[in-house]
């Protein structure tokens, strides 16, 4: 136990004006559950945040959807705008993580900030929505890697016609390769994440150099300054460019919308109350800088954007790389440079999703709680929780085979589910005058009211905008079903609350948890 983090661990010692932590009379399941070992230091925790956040590679993997919302200048300015809002969210999360450093993340924070009356239900919904979101993050990464692998094969086989089932095979290999890594290589995870962070930074450097040099070598030249910075193009069918800009922020949000990822290894970091805010700052800063550099270098290397739109490729980013390098080998090399970090990011998503489900099981919020809430004494990891995430992701891959529209709706709900889970922790914190949490080492004081308020305004506004159809006119296949998915999942979580949670779930024992941290 780290004495400093215990003494300053916010809610763990109740101040006069604070609400008594939830579940002070019931015996918590953590009493008989092995705790996770502290295998991460500050450096490896920063590497985990950078790798799981994976900002520039996430932008590249979903580039074609972004280009419809304003073209290259739209992507750049929309990314900057949404990043600013996520800085406020990240600051709010860093403050709560410093005060309540627990692997449940928003699940624990919402339990405390909402007070004894609403804490159980707020924590319940925040935990489940966040857990579901991260399993969709796993699926998104696996599908991106699968598409890139099949595209790479098609580069050298012109008569080959990609099929969904082929992507699904690559999806499964990625899905279970990452799952087994997290399950059985827990001791190696800090090193894997350090390697992942090196691949992200090194891969960006390689990509920038290639995109900067090759267009002049292959004779195609560079895009104009106007094309990159001011040539706005609206391919959505909406008449309002302002709305197109706001809707286009979704693509940037997909890349930067993971500020809570590293908080789920709080119980595996020494002095988590002090170190988590530093890790979040590192993740956000490096993610923003690398993404901006990547976008600028890539857009200057594009010389025929209409061709990319018309190709309807399984991997539009591969077509962009093909234009930039002028060679199939060059395009393949750049795809490998981006695939490796995404693979490491998928491992990070498994860490986050598995740890979140583990805490839900540990507090009897999940079915089969004795299994999902246990740490394997042999492998020192939440074995069954991680396995459950792998099974769920496999089912999502089956959805990809059946309906691409349905799969995209599930993946698109990642941003809505994560931000809703953040809202369930930040909004009660604001509405209660920020009095239910004792300040941790990082505390914003009065400025926190403004930061929390901006976060709470952005989240519901963005929720509404991101539920609009992606383009007009719309059809059954192109309709945006994320609102249906999000509401449906929230309904199922609520139903599980009525069936199980209301009578059996008591919430985390924050006092006991502080002793473990």
Image (cartoon, helix red, strand yellow):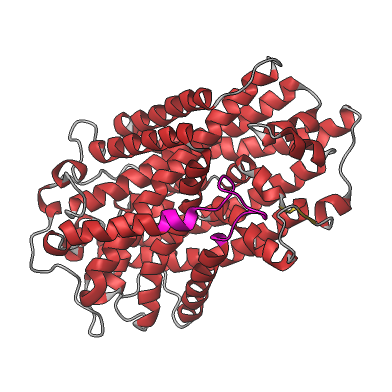
Rendering quarter of residue 372? top left
Q: Residue at x 39, y 59 (%)?
A: 487
Q: Main secondary structure of the magenta part?
A: loop
Q: Is residue 470 magenta?
A: yes
Where is residue 6 drawn, in percent x and y? 25, 64
Please identify the quadrant where the C terminus is shown: bottom left
In the rendered image, the vertical position of residue 393 relative to residue 229, given as above or below: above
- Compared with 490, 224 (above or below) is above
Quadrant of res 351: top left
Q: What stretch of residues is rendered in magenta?
A: 466-486
Q: Nearer the viewer, residue 237 or 120?
A: 237
Q: Is residue 310 magenta?
A: no
Task: Out of 192 and 239, give the one closest to the viewer.
Answer: 239
Residue 107, horizontal then vertical, whole percent: 31, 60
Residue 190 appears left or right of 127: right
Quadrant where the N terminus lies?
Answer: bottom left
Q: Residue at x 30, y 75 (%)?
A: 438
Residue drawn at 61 percent across, 53 percent down: 251
Please state the horizontal and vertical placement of residue 80, each as a whole percent of the image: 66, 60
Between 109 and 118, the one lying in front of the other is 118
Q: Is residue 300 left or right of residue 453?
A: right
Instruction: Tell me where residue 266 appears, x and y as whole percent.
Output: 33, 53
Does residue 100 appear in this view?
A: no
């Amino acid at each position: 136990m780290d004495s400093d983090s215990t003494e300053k661990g916010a809610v763990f010692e109740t101040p006069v004006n604070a609400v008594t932590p939830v579940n002070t009379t019931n015996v918590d399941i953590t009493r008989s559950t092995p705790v996770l070992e502290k295998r991460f230091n500050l450096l490896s925790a920063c590497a985990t945040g950078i790798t799981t956040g994976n900002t520039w590679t996430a932008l590249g993997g979903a580039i074609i959807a972004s280009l419809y919302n304003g073209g290259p200048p739209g992507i750049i300015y929309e990314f900057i705008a949404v990043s600013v809002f996520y800085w406020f969210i990240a600051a709010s999360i860093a403050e709560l993580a410093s005060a309540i450093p627990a692997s449940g993340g928003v699940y624990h924070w919402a339990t405390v900030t909402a007070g004894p009356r609403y804490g159980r239900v707020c924590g319940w919904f925040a935990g489940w929505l966040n857990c579901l979101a991260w399993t969709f993050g796993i699926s998104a990464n696996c599908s991106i890697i699968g598409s890139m692998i099949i595209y790479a094969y098609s580069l050298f086989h012109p008569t080959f016609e990609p099929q969904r089932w082929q992507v699904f095979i690559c999806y499964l290999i990625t899905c279970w390769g990452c799952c087994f890594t997290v399950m059985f290589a827990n001791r190696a995870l800090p090193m894997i994440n350090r390697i992942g962070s090196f691949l992200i930074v090194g891969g960006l450097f390689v990509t920038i150099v290639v995109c900067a040099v090759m267009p002049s070598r292959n004779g195609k030249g560079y895009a104009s300054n106007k094309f990159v910075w001011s040539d706005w193009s609206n391919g959505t069918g909406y008449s309002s460019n302002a709305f197109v800009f706001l809707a286009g922020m979704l693509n940037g949000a997909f890349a930067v919308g993971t500020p809570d990822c590293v908080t789920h290894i709080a119980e595996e970091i020494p002095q988590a109350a002090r170190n988590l805010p530093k890790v979040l700052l590192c993740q956000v800063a490096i993610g923003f800088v690398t993404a901006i550099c990547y976008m600028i270098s890539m857009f200057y290397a594009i010389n025929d954007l209409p061709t990319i739109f018309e190709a309807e490729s399984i991997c539009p980013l591969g077509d962009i790389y093909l234009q930039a390098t002028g060679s199939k080998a060059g395009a393949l090399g750049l795809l490998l440079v981006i695939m490796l970090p995404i693979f490491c990011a998928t491992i990070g998503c498994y860490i986050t999703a598995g740890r979140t489900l583990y805490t839900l099981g540990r507090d009897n919020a999940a079915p089969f709680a004795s299994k999902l809430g246990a740490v394997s004494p042999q492998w020192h990891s939440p074995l069954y929780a991680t396995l459950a995430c792998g099974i769920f992701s496999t089912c999502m891959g089956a959805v990809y085979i059946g309906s691409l529209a349905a799969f995209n709706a599930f993946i698109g709900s990642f941003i809505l589910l994560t931000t809703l889970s953040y809202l369930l922790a930040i909004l009660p914190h604001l509405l209660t005058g920020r009095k239910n949490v004792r300040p941790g080492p990082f505390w914003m004081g009065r400025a926190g009211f403004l930061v929390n308020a901006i976060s709470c305004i952005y989240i519901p506004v963005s929720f509404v905008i991101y539920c609009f159809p992606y383009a007009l006119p719309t059809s059954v296949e192109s309709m945006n079903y994320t609102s249906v998915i999000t509401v449906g999942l929230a309904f199922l979580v609520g139903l599980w609350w009525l069936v199980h949670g209301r009578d059996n779930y008591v919430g985390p024992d924050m006092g006991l948890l502080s002793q473990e941290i």
